[in-house]
Amino acid sequence: MPLFVHQDGRVLLPTARSVWDRLLSHSPQPTSFIDDQTAGDAFTTSRASAEAEGQTLRDELLRLHEEHLGRERQKGEYAFAARKRTIQRIGLPEVRNHRLKELEDERREWQEQLAKQAETSFELVPLIMIHIQGGGTDD
């Protein structure tokens, strides 16, 4: 998620995308570096802006993940029910009971795996932070 935070605090997403595209297509050379305090302040401001601007993206990713898990749960439940019906029709009672127990153990393990997949966490990691000053060329 490219992010451009203006000195006055405005978040300019179209500018961020433009800068990101230019970084990918050119090899800019740094002309100066900012001091530690300024860099720390910029990081703090950028992180707060990224958390705010990224909330929509985070919510969308979470929604898609939950939809995926819902589809996986439906498919799995259907498959386990079909296997259970098949097991209940075939074999001696002792064999059926053993197979049903194995199937239930497998189903419980599958449910645990789904529960682990449902646990989500988001991490915000900056790939690169740059400070842009005016006065350069139009490239």
Image (cartoon, grey):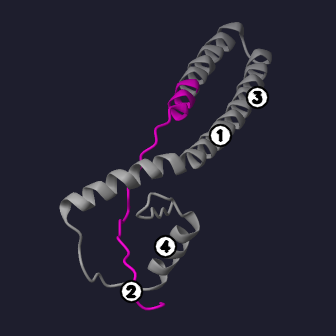
Q: Is residue 79 within the magenta segment?
A: no
Sequence-wise first label, 2 or 4: 4
User: Which residue is found at the position 19% from the left and 61% from the top?
Assistant: 36
Q: Quadrant of residue 83?
A: top right
Q: Distance between the residues labelled 2 and 1?
A: 43 Å
Residue linked to disc 4: 20
Q: How far apart are marks 1 and 3 (CA)?
A: 23 Å
Label 1 crowd bin: few (<14), some (14–19), many (20+), radius 10 Å: few
Sequence-wise first label, 1 or 4: 4
Q: Which is closer to the viewer, label 4 or label 3?
A: 4
Dot 2 and dot 1 residues touching (CB under 8 Å):
no
- Residue type for callout 4: Trp
Q: Is residue 114 within the magenta segment?
A: yes
| Residue 78, x across and y down, in percent | 76, 28
Dot 2 and dot 4 residues touching (CB under 8 Å):
no
User: Which residue is found at the position 46% from the left and 51% from the top?
Assistant: 49
Residue range corresponding to the magenta coloring: 111-139
Identify whether 137 is placed above or below 13: below
- Residue type for callout 3: Tyr
- Quick one: 52 or 107, which is closer to the camera? 52
Q: Which mark is residue 63?
A: 1
Q: Which is closer to the viewer, label 2 or label 1?
A: 2
- Residue type for callout 2: Gly
Residue linked to disc 2: 135
- Residue type for callout 1: Arg
Sequence-wise first label, 1 or 3: 1
Q: Residue 78 carries which label?
A: 3
Identify whether 95 is placed above or below 24: above
User: Which residue is the extreme one toward the top?
Assistant: 93
Sequence-wise first label, 4 or 3: 4
Q: Which is closer to the viewer, label 1 or label 4?
A: 4
Label 2: element kind? loop
